[in-house]
Structure formats: C-alpha cells, structure tokens
Amino acid sequence: MCDAHRDKTVPLSDIPESVDRVTSFGADGGCRIDEFFIDRAIDFAWMAAGKTQPNPLVGALVVKDGRILGEGYHQKYGEDHAESIALERAGESARGGTLYVTLEPCAHTGNTPPCVDEVISNGVGRVVIPTLDPDERVNGRGVRMLRERGIQVDIGVRSDRALLLNMAYFKSKLGLGPAVTLKIAMTLDGKIASRRGQRDDITGTEARRMAHRLRAVHEGVLIGIETFVTDSPQLDCRLLDSVDPPVPVVIDGSLKFPGRHPWLDRRQMVILTSKDAPEEREAALVRAGARVVRCGTSESAIDIAEAVAELEKRGVSSVLVEGGRKVFSSFVEAGVWDGMFLFVSPVLFGPDGVGLADRAVGKENLGARFAGASVVSGDVVVSLISEKTRSAILDRLS
Ligand SMILES: NC(=O)c1ccc[n+]([C@@H]2O[C@H](COP(=O)([O-])OP(=O)(O)OC[C@H]3O[C@@H](n4cnc5c(N)ncnc54)[C@H](OP(=O)(O)O)[C@@H]3O)[C@@H](O)[C@H]2O)c1
Ligand SMILES: [Zn+2]
C-alpha cells in the first residue's frame, strides 16, 4: 500500500469489536460465499447506526481468493464512503478482486467523489450488491457505469437484510411513507415478561446494544402506556457513543402519563391519545412540554394507521415500536409495519409468562418473511420483513 493510501486508512482499532461477536445468516438460501461476505458487510454497516443520517448505513469488503483484503463502513455523515475505505485498505491488491457492498456504489459527487470512479480505477473485477440505491442521482446509474467498464455486477444477494438496514431511507426516497419497525425481546417459549406487570431484562448487553442501534436509526420510539408503567424504560441509546436518542412516543388512550417526567421537557415527547381523553389532563401535559395528539379509536384502541400518519406530520417519519404485547399485536393486526426484530434469549418463562401476541393472526394476514438471523453473544436476533413493503420497494427499484 502506498503512503497516500496508508494515511487515509481507518485503523483497525476504530472498528468496534462487537462485529466479531455477531454472526449473521440470511434466510434467502444457505450460507454461500457471496451471502457470507454481504452478511459481514451488513453487520459492519450497523456499527454506524445513528451517525450517518441523512445518508444510509453502508458496509463494504474487498475479497480476493477467499481472503478479505480490506473492509470498512460509512462511519459518519460527510466522511468517506464504505467502498472507498475498503478499497483504500486493500490498496493495489484490490485489482481483480470482488467488492461486496451493501448498497449500489454512488455515481454522483456529494461530500465525496463518486465511488464508481474509485471502483473502476482500482481494477476491481466484480461487484456484489443486495439492491440498487433509491436515490434518484444513483438508482441504476452506478451499476450501468460499472458494467460499461466491463465490471461484472451481481444484484440481489441478501436484499431483505439490506432493506431492513436502511428501511427509512428506502421508504422516504421512494415516497412510500413512514417506516415502522417492531422490536421485542422474548424467551424460547415466546414470552415477553415473566408475569403480568413484571419488568424483566430478557437479553444480554450485546443484544441490547443492537436494540439501541435500532433506536438510533429511527426518529421515534413507541411504547404502550402499560409498558411505560411497568418497565419505566429510558428509551435512549446509552450503550452507543454520541448518538442522539429518538423522540419517545407513548400510546395512552386516557392520558395516564404523569405530569412530571424527563421526557416532557427534554425529549419533545409525543402522547397519542383518544378523542375523548380528559381535556384538563391534555392541558397539563402540554404545559409540561408534551405534544398530545388525539386520534380516532375503535373499541377504545387508537387507530394505528392514523397514529403513524400523525407522527409523520410532526416530523417523526420513522418509528421503532417496542411493545408491549397489546401494542405489538395492534400494529401487526393493522398491517402497519415494515420490519420486525425478535430478540430471543435462551430461557423459558413457563405458563405464568406473558405471550408475545394477544390474538391470532394467520400467515397470509401477517405477510411476514424471514430476512435473517444474527447470533449476538448468547442471544439470537431474528429479523423479518413485510412482504407488502418488500414488493413495494423492489418494484420501484428495478
Ligand atoms: N420483552 C419485551 O421486549 C417487552 C417490551 C415491552 C413491554 N413488555 C412487557 O409487556 C407488558 C405490557 O404489555 P401490555 O400488553 O400489558 O401493554 P402495552 O401494550 O404496553 O400498552 C397497552 C395499552 O396501551 C393503550 N392503547 C391505546 N390504544 C392502543 C392500541 N391501538 N393498541 C394497543 N394499546 C393501545 C391501552 O391503554 P388505554 O386503554 O389506557 O389507552 C392499552 O391497555 C409488560 O409486562 C412489559 O414488561 C415486554
Ligand atoms: Zn459512494
């Protein structure tokens, strides 16, 4: 590697160790070599959660003869793109190698020069990507430019995991509305609490760090009032370095939320309530700093689609839903979700435990497709994508 390259190289110590404790598998066809490397690039990309907006999370690897020669991820908005870091690290040896990158390489000049130029000038022979980039300045142009220079480009490897990595980015660029992700921690027997009204730490720290990464890529984090009362969660990103926490959102049909709480004056919280909630409670909460939004109801449950639309009007256009059971079931039943992350811990809560869902939803109505699984220290994170969302995005990208 020449000195110029070495100067721009990201030291290995800058790459958080935790990626080495994550082993991921996609659900779309075993663990072949391309899938293996794209999975690793996706795991790298997640490391920068909360630091790249409005840019997407991107990871990249340069591989030759089965050996990783360089890897990197887009670490922060305005800084080097993942492909560029991986190529710099690989240096001269990238010639004839394969570049694995989690999104189509960019074809336009932004804060950094177009990555396609760098890919071409480094002599890479093949590029593997899960999907095209929905940004209209790129969408297909990057791939065309590479192919025109004789570089083989393979598209579609681990596309479901890659869509989940940047769901809000894909949906907003394609005009598909707000992004909704469901996240829940559960036991091997599908329980989310050991008994009613009980707060439990189900998964270990590494899995919780991943959950904080999910928070970091959403503008809002939503829970039901019962979870607020039982768990008193902080809904922040304290296991990550210098990442702003999302806006807390609570579904609270009769405005039981307390008049004093740090979220009220410090976190611009939103309370979603019903049209007949007491006016004096609303006035008190608004005075304390909450944004109170009245939504339509059916059988005293707040209309989920309306709630998400109201959040978008208030600048919360991506939301991570963290339960509890009633809230989770309402989103699933309404079909208002794009991705789902189930954090599974090897423990059984038995018959007293609270189950994940409070009603049955058939396979057809659920419309969920397994995207992948990651082994994170002692826990497993299973990810699913909504069939409806997946087709809407892929139809528009091609
Ligand atoms: N393992 C995990 O990841 C996890 C995560 C979160 C919670 N939990 C556990 O789950 C339990 C709490 O769950 P929960 O089911 O009792 O309560 P919840 O889902 O947190 O809150 C449900 C409440 O929200 C209000 N609500 C209004 N509209 C709603 C709608 N459309 N859909 C759903 N709720 C609506 C209702 O109260 P009003 O009638 O007053 O409006 C309802 O009783 C706790 O034990 C907690 O520890 C586990
Ligand atoms: Zn780029």
Image (tube, rainbow, N blue to C red):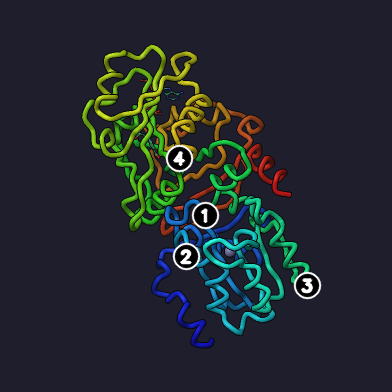
Q: Which residue is mark 1?
A: 55
Q: Residues within 10 Å of mark 2 (few under 14, many from 20)?
A: few
Vertical side of 250 occupied by 389: above or below: below
Does label 2 or label 3 sit earlier along the sequence?
2
Q: Is residue 249 left or right of residue 337?
A: left
Give the spatial CA distance, label 1 vs label 3: 28 Å
Vertical side of 58 occupied by 226: above or below: above
Does label 3 or label 4 sit earlier along the sequence?
3
Residue 245 in the image: state x and y as whole percent: 35, 46
Q: Amino acid at mark 4?
A: Leu
Q: Which residue is mark 4?
A: 320
Does label 2 or label 1 sit earlier along the sequence?
1
State the residue at coordinates (56%, 61%): 110
Q: Which-is-in-front pick, marks 3 and 4? A: 3
Residue 105 in the image: state x and y as whole percent: 63, 63
Give the spatial CA distance, label 2 vs label 4: 27 Å
